Image (cartoon, rainbow, N blue to C red):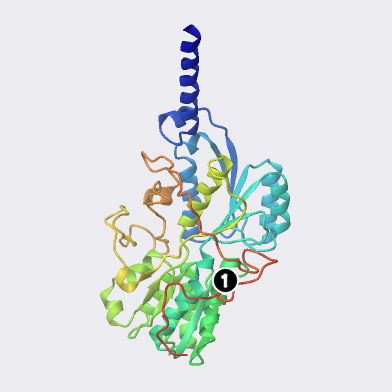
C-alpha cells in the first residue's frame, strides 16, 4: 500500500513539473529560473523615425516579462558603410552572441560574416531589409509587393498617362532595390507614363521634402509622385505650392496619412494610398528569434513574409489619443512627429506594443509576452534580395492588392 501511495505521489510530482515546464507566461513561468540570452540589435542606417521606432520596440519587448529576466540586449549603430556593419557583426560574434537581430545595409556584402556567425551558433534574424546568405532568417514585407502595387495605384489614378517623380530610399539596400524594381515593372507597361525625376530621399521626410522641392522647381507640371518612406516630406513640398496638388502614393508616415483628412488638400486634388514598411516587422522578428532560441518554436532559417499594410484615402481613421484600437491608423498632429511611421501594432502578433513603448523604449505597463501564432507565411524567392542561387517566380511582380483599371 505504501509503495502504491508513493507511486501516485511521484506521478503527481512529475505531472506538476511537466506543466510548470511548459507554461509560457504567468507567475509560474516568470518565477522559474531563466537563462540569460546575449542579444545584439545591429542597426545600419539610423537617420529617421522608423529606425528609432524599431529600436525602441525591440528594447521595450526585451524589458517585458518574461523577457526582462531572459535577455541581455545591446544596441549598436554602424551607419551606412557595409564595412562598419561587418565589423560590428564580427565583434558581436566574438562576444559570443546568442542572437543578432539586424537591419542589414546590404543583401550581399554581409554574407561571409553572417555565415561565420551561423557556424559559431549565432542566430541571425534580419528585419525589413534582407540578406541572401541562406543561414539567416529574413523577416520582411518587401516580397509582398509594395513597389508594384503602389505604382499601379498611381497609374490607375492618372489613367495611364502623366509625368511622375520617384522618391527612393537608401541606395544599396534590398528594400530600395525591390521597391524600385517592382514600380518600374509597372511603369514600363505604360508608354504614357514618364519618370521625369528620380532621386533619393533616404527614407527621411526632411531630405525627401528638399529633394522633391528641387524636382518641382524643374518640373512644375508633374502629374503624380511615387514615393518610398519620406512621403510626409513629399506631401509638404507639394502642399507648399499654391493651387493644384497631385496624387501621391507613399508609405505610412503620420503626416502623410493626416493629409488625407485635410479638407483643403483634398479639395486641391490630393489623392493616393498609404502602404509601406511597418516598424512592427522588427517586433515580430524579435519575438520569433526568442521563440527559436528558447525552444518554443522549431524553425529552420527561412524567408518569412510580413503582410503589406494598405490604406486607401477613405480608410484613414484617427486614433483616440494614444489608444490604438478599432482599426485606427493615424495619430493626431502634435502627438507624434510627421515622420513617425504608424504601423507599429498588431493585436495578434504584437499585443504588447503601445505608442509610448515605441516612443520611449519602455515596456507597456502590465504587458507580458504572448506567444506568436504557430503559422508563418513563407516569402517567395527573390534573387538578389533574399536568395542568390534561386529563380524568381514567373509572376514575381504580380499585383496582390490593386486591380488594373488603366489600359496600357
Residue at the spot 57% in from the left edge and 34% down from the top edge? 36
What is the x, y in percent for residue 222? 44, 87
What is the x, y in percent for residue 351? 39, 48
Task: Determine if residue 203 is in view.
Answer: no
Q: Is residue 69 above or below residue 97?
A: above
Q: Is residue 157 above or below residue 227?
A: below
Secondary structure of the residue carrying tag 1 is helix
387 relative to 156 in the view: left or right: right
Q: Is residue 20 above or below residue 87?
A: above
The one of 189 and 365 positioned closer to us in this rendering: 189
Q: What is the number of callouts on the image?
A: 1
What is the x, y in percent for residue 327? 31, 59
86 relative to 327 in the view: left or right: right
Of all residues, the one furthest to the top in this rendering is 2
The one of 295 and 237 positioned closer to us in this rendering: 295
Task: Determine if residue 84 is in view.
Answer: yes
What is the x, y in percent for residue 367? 38, 41
Q: Quadrant for residue 73, please give it.
A: top right
234 relative to 383 in the view: left or right: left
**Disc 1 crowd, CA 10 A, few/some/many (<14, 14-19, 20+):** many
Of all residues, the one furthest to the bottom in this rendering is 192
161 relative to 83 in the view: left or right: left
Query: Residue tagged by mark 1?
Result: 178
Amino acid at each position: 500500500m505504501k509503495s502504491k501511495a508513493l507511486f501516485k505521489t511521484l506521478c503527481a510530482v512529475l505531472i506538476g513539473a511537466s506543466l510548470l515546464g511548459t507554461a509560457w507566461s504567468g507567475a509560474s513561468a516568470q518565477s522559474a529560473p531563466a537563462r540569460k540570452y546575449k542579444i545584439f540589435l545591429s542597426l545600419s542606417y539610423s537617420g529617421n523615425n522608423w529606425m528609432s521606432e524599431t529600436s525602441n520596440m525591440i528594447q521595450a519587448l526585451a524589458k517585458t516579462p518574461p523577457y526582462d529576466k531572459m535577455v541581455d540586449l545591446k544596441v549598436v549603430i554602424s551607419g551606412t558603410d557595409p564595412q562598419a556593419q561587418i565589423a560590428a557583426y564580427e565583434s558581436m560574434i566574438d562576444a559570443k552572441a546568442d542572437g543578432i537581430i539586424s537591419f542589414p545595409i546590404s543583401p550581399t556584402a554581409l554574407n561571409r560574416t553572417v555565415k561565420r556567425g551561423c557556424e559559431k551558433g549565432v542566430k541571425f534574424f534580419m528585419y525589413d531589409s534582407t540578406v541572401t546568405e541562406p543561414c539567416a532568417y529574413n523577416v520582411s514585407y518587401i516580397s509582398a509587393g509594395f513597389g508594384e502595387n503602389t505604382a499601379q495605384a498611381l497609374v490607375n489614378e492618372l489613367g495611364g498617362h502623366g509625368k511622375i517623380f520617384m522618391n527612393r530610399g537608401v541606395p544599396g539596400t534590398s528594400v530600395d532595390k525591390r521597391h524600385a524594381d517592382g514600380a518600374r515593372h509597372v511603369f514600363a507597361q505604360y508608354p504614357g507614363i514618364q519618370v521625369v525625376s528620380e532621386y533619393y530621399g533616404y527614407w527621411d521626410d526632411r531630405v525627401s521634402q528638399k529633394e522633391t522641392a528641387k524636382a518641382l522647381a524643374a518640373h512644375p507640371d508633374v502629374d503624380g509622385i511615387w514615393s518610398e518612406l519620406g512621403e510626409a516630406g513629399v506631401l509638404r513640398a507639394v502642399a507648399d505650392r499654391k493651387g493644384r496638388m497631385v496624387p501621391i502614393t507613399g508609405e505610412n508616415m503620420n503626416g502623410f496619412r493626416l493629409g488625407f483628412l485635410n479638407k483643403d488638400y483634398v479639395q486641391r486634388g490630393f489623392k493616393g494610398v498609404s502602404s509601406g514598411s511597418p516598424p512592427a516587422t522588427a517586433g515580430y522578428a524579435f519575438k520569433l528569434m526568442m521563440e527559436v532560441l528558447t525552444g518554443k518554436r522549431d524553425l529552420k532559417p527561412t524567408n518569412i513574409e510580413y503582410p503589406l499594410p494598405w490604406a486607401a484615402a477613405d480608410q484613414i481613421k484617427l486614433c483616440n489619443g494614444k489608444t490604438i484600437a478599432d482599426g485606427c491608423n493615424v495619430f493626431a498632429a502634435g502627438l507624434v512627429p510627421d515622420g513617425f511611421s504608424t504601423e507599429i501594432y498588431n493585436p495578434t502578433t504584437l499585443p504588447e506594443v503601445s505608442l509610448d513603448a515605441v516612443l520611449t523604449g519602455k515596456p507597456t505597463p502590465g504587458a507580458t509576452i504572448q506567444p506568436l501564432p504557430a503559422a508563418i507565411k513563407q516569402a517567395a524567392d527573390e534573387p538578389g534580395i533574399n536568395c542568390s542561387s534561386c529563380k524568381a517566380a514567373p509572376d514575381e511582380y504580380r499585383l496582390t492588392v490593386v486591380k488594373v483599371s488603366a489600359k496600357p
